[in-house]
Amino acid sequence: MVEGYRKEAALFQSDKLEVAEVVQIERAARDQGQWGRMAACYHPDSVVSISWIETSGRDFVAASEKAFAAGIRHLHQMAPTLVTLNGDRALAESGAAILLGGRIGGVEVMVTSHARMHARVERRDGVWRIARLGAVYFEDAMAARVPGETPVLDAARLAGYRPSLRFLSYLLEESGKTPSADLAGIDRPETVEAFLAAEEAWLAG
């Protein structure tokens, strides 16, 4: 009985490690422009819903590749991934500092967005892959890349963005993207509650 319990516990831990690894690999592959490796982390019917895009996993990879080729870099400093398992389903969440470079009025800037990445990960045919990727946004900041330079921001436009991702939204719009106003963020606690409730409901199956 004890040996059986040990084997079951070892399998449980192995599953958690596989789930955490696929989430970390997906972000690392995106940062390094490894598109095949990134695509392999998603199920064919997966969904991605983050600051600048809501689409399928496949189309997210394609959009990321296009942005990368255009010189747009979104880099991710990832914290360890926490995994909650229920059979062939798992929730994986990772703290992240998302670094986005760009220009505002000719001034080179860097935005740092603090968020938690949330992934629904599902095992199909023995393989764990991402079924949905989303995020909860906390706060962000902007700084000039060159000391002494100062980006000139439109104060009224900046005030129109949500506090949890205002600089991120500003920079995304500068690069031609449409930032979402409906994402989960701590400035609107009800959005976070609804987001997490939906994640738990999916895990319960």
Image (cartoon, rainbow, N blue to C red):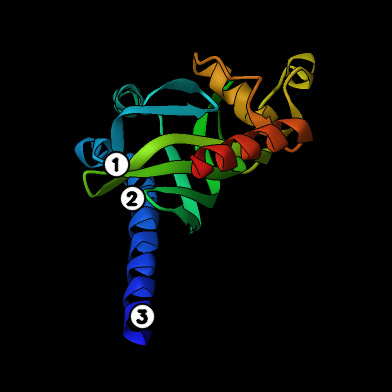
Q: Is residue 35 visible to the viewer in this orientation of the structure?
A: yes
Residue at the disc numbered 1? 41
Q: Secondary structure at mark 1?
A: loop
Q: Secondary structure at mark 3?
A: helix
Which image quarter: residue 195? top right
Residue at the disc numbered 2? 22
Q: Secondary structure at mark 2?
A: helix
User: Which residue is found at the position 31% from the left and 76% from the top?
Assistant: 7
Mark whose residue sits in front, 1 or 3: 3
- Confirm or deny contact between disc 2 and disc 1 (CB under 8 A): yes
User: Which residue is found at the position 40% from the left and 56% from the top?
Assistant: 20
Q: Is residue 145 visible to the viewer in this orientation of the structure?
A: no
Image position of 66 (left or right of 136)? left
Between the C-alphas of marks 3 and 2, the distance is: 25 Å
Image position of 126 (left or right of 112)? left
Crowd class of label 1 (few under 14; some 14 to 19; many from 20; radius 10 Å)? many
Mark with earlier residue (3, 2): 3
Which image quarter: residue 8? bottom left
Mark whose residue sits in front, 3 or 2: 3
Mark with earlier residue (2, 1): 2
Between the C-alphas of marks 1 and 3, the distance is: 29 Å
Amino acid beneath label 1: Cys
x and y percent of residue 13 in the render? 38, 68
Crowd class of label 2 (few under 14; some 14 to 19; many from 20; radius 10 Å)? many
Q: In the rendered image of this protein, does residue 9 appear above or below residue 66?
A: below
x and y percent of residue 147 in the render? 62, 44
Residue at the disc numbered 3? 6
Amino acid beneath label 2: Val
Which residue, as the protein is rendered here, is positioned at the far bottom?
2
x and y percent of residue 64 in the render? 35, 28
User: Which residue is found at the position 36% from the left and 80% from the top?
Assistant: 6
